[in-house]
Amino acid sequence: MKAYVYGANGAEITDVAKPSPKGTQVLVRVHACGLNRADLGMTKGHAHGSVGGAGTVLGMEWAGEVAELGPDAKGVKVGDKVMGSGAAAFAEYTLADHGRLFRAPSNMNFDEACTLPIAITTMHNAVVTIGGLQAGQSVMIQGASSGVGLMAMQIAKFKGAQLVVGSSTDATRRARLTEYGADLAVDSSDAGWVDQVLRATSGEGVDLIVDQVSGKVASQNLKATKIKGRIVNVGRLGGTHADFNFDLHAARRIDYIGVTFRTRSIEEIRDIFDGVRRDIWPAVESRKLQLPIDKVFAFDDIGKAFEHMEANKHLGKIVVTL
């Protein structure tokens, strides 16, 4: 089968053996894949947890049809239209644990369905489960113009946030954040953004920051979070190391929590998928929670899709179809 593989010459399309499902695995015939920032690093050979190195089939989210079931797989049948996340998504067939997929709603095509699995699971977990957002509270999403960022703002609004702040360093994308739930859009490359947030919250700061940027905004986030507020660190697009004001962190008594799927067990990931199904799935089915598709590429042009992502001018998801 065709797959997008990291090898000696970098990432390229090549032929690999079709996998077979074992245990609770499901074999999926992939129809569309969503690109993510982490994929961009892996195309350059950057190890991401246990992923990386020659021979790695790349990709993390997809939509398709169930082709075969492992002996212990439950909850789906051959022919079901599904979407999910897991390793080796950029291929004609991929494997997924039966607890790491959703039935794709009948009102979504494969292109639309493949944009959602990572965004809804990552941000429901960060905003609701870990972040503890309650109706009437305020939240800021750092890096709000990414696919997961746009979904985070929508989930926050859906759960009753009184104020949603989104950040983007790009003026064009920043201007569109209000379309996806932002009440206030700020430029996190301008040091004045903290004052904007404080003015919008009567000087107190927000209850919750979901941070996909980190780096130089880490200590600024502390200033923009209210006393006894929460910061959930989801991404490090602005850098993995930076100055951190420990005194301010202590003075404001902020809960600072780091999250990643890379060190989660399959049982933890199943719980996250179940949490989405219990809490917000009707809003996914009704299309209340959805993401814009920036551009669609054919699988043979997947290299161009990554060039488009690296240019960093897109809003929403980049999709590759098979």
Image: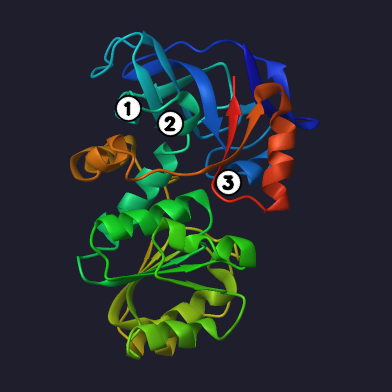
**Tags 1 and 2 in contact by the CB under 8 Å rule?**
yes
Picture colour scheme: rainbow
Residue 172, horizontal then vertical, whole percent: 62, 62
Report helix, strand or loop for mark 2: helix
**Quarter of the image where one finds residue 98:** top left
Residue visible at 61% across and 68% down? 169
Residue 96, horizontal then vertical, whole percent: 40, 24
Q: Nearer the viewer, mark 3 or mark 2?
A: 2
The crowding category of the residue bearing disc 2, from other C-alpha atoms within 10 Å (few below 14, some 14 to 19, many at least 20), is many
**Label annotation for residue 247:** none
Residue 194, horizontal then vertical, whole percent: 48, 84
Q: Nearer the viewer, mark 1 or mark 3?
A: 1
Distance in Å between CA atoms under marks 3 and 2: 19 Å
Disc 1 residue type? Pro
User: What residue is pinned by disc 2?
Assistant: 113
Query: Is residue 303 shown above or below 208?
Result: above
Of pointers 1 and 3, the one earlier in the residue sequence: 3
**Tags 3 and 2 in contact by the CB under 8 Å rule?**
no
User: What residue is pinned by disc 1?
Assistant: 105
Residue 86 in view, yes or no: no
User: What residue is pinned by disc 3?
Assistant: 38
Report helix, strand or loop for mark 1: loop
Distance in Å between CA atoms under marks 1 and 3: 26 Å
Q: If the image is split into quadrants, where does the N terminus sit?
A: top right
**Quarter of the image where one finds residue 157:** bottom left
Drawn side of residue 119 relative to residue 301, left or right: left
